[in-house]
Image: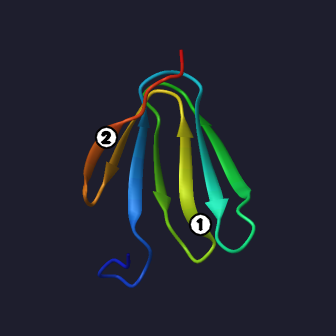
Amino acid sequence: MKSQFGLGEYIVIKALENGVNVMGLTRGTDTRFHHAEKLDKGEVLVAQFTDHTSAIKIRGNAKIITAVGEIESERKE
């Protein structure tokens, strides 16, 4: 999806606990991790889908806000 500014869509990730991992995955025939961030409770990351980033994996309890809605990830017990 392209935004009105000609760039990839943005998402907002807010950590609801310490140690939330956010990983960017690449496009192409070989999907690989290309970037990782660790967020503590209350920290917010604004991420963008780009020519290089086709997916974002979130591990831990976080609120994810996108143009199409909101969802919360859950911590694996």
Secondary structure found at label 2: strand
Q: Real-space Cα distance between discs 1 and 2?
A: 20 Å
Q: Tell me if 59 is positioned left or right of 61 in this view.
A: right
Q: Residue furthest top?
A: 77
Whether residue 53 sits left or right of residue 28 in the image: it is left
For image coordinates 54% across by 73% down, the residue present is 50
Q: Residue at x 72, y 73 (%)?
A: 29
Q: Where 64 sits versus 53, above or below?
A: above
Q: Which mark is residue 53?
A: 1
Check disc 1 and give the amino acid type.
Thr
**Relative side of 67 to 27, left or right:** left
Q: State the residue in front, 54 or 12.
A: 54
- Please, is residue 24 above or below residue 57 in the view? below
Question: Label 2 belongs to which residue?
Answer: 71
Task: Please report whichever mark, 1 or 2, sits nearer to the chain's N-terminal start.
Answer: 1
How is this picture coloured?
Answer: rainbow
Residue drawn at 43 percent across, 79 percent down: 7
Q: Identity of the amino acid at label 2?
A: Ile
Badge 1 marks a residue whose secondary structure is: strand
Q: Percent x, y for residue 74?
A: 44, 27
Q: Nearer the viewer, residue 42 or 77?
A: 77
Badge 1 density bin: few <14, some 14–19, many ≥20, Cα 10 Å: many
24, above or below 48, in the image: above
Q: Position of residue 56 (x, y in %)?
A: 54, 53
Residue 22: assigned label: none
Q: Is residue 4 left or right of residue 20?
A: left
